[in-house]
Image: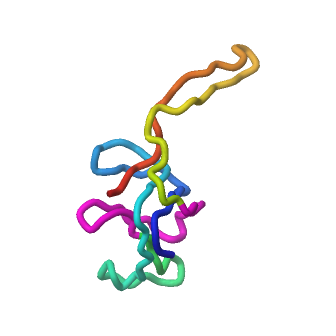
């Protein structure tokens, strides 16, 4: 797995800007557990995806990656449309910040 990908994780994570994200975009390099200086056991992941550049990257455990989409161009980072809905109030449309961390 080489190149730029949009990686969606199973759980939220914090980025260096202090915000929470569910996805990261950037160059991906798959690394083994020995690259982090620790040895995992059979109950944990044994590979990781390093997303971003050498100076700005995040590392997501392979077992936490839900989707990996080849994405050469930077995805939309503007506010995105979202909605809430329930029986009492119906549907309410709004905009929210993106959940994609740009790791470059």
Magenta-highlighted residues: 50-70
Quick check: 95 above or below 16?
A: above
The residue lying at 47 percent from left, 39 percent from top is 98
Q: Main secondary structure of the magenta part?
A: strand
The residue lying at 41 percent from left, 79 percent from top is 31
Q: Residue furthest front?
A: 73
Q: Quadrant of residue 8?
A: bottom right
Q: Residue furthest top?
A: 89
Is residue 84 within the magenta segment? no
- For the C terminus, give its image quadrant: bottom left
Q: Say which of 92 and 26 sits in front.
A: 26
- Report x, y in % for residue 86: 71, 22
- Report x, y in % for residue 19: 35, 42
Q: Is residue 61 left or right of residue 56?
A: right
Is residue 60 within the magenta segment? yes
The total of numbered circles placed on residues is 0
Quick check: 90 above or below 10?
A: above
Q: Quadrant of residue 10?
A: bottom right
- Report x, y in % for residue 74: 44, 51
The residue lying at 54 percent from left, 69 percent from top is 63
The residue lying at 47 percent from left, 83 percent from top is 41
Q: Residue furthest right?
A: 87
Q: Say which of 45 and 102 sits in front.
A: 102
- Report x, y in % for residue 100: 45, 47
Quick check: 27 above or below 25?
A: below
């Amino acid at each position: 797995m080489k190149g730029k990908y949009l990686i969606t994780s199973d759980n939220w994570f914090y980025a260096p800007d202090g915000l929470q994200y569910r996805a990261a975009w950037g160059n991906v390099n798959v690394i083994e557990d020995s690259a982090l200086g620790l040895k995992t056991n059979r109950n944990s992941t044994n590979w990781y995806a390093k997303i971003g550049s050498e100076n700005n990257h995040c590392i997501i455990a392979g077992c936490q990656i839900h989707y990996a989409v080849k994405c050469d161009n930077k995805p939309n980072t503007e506010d995105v449309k979202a909605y809430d809905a329930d029986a009492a109030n119906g549907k309410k449309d709004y905009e929210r910040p993106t959940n994609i961390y740009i790791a470059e």
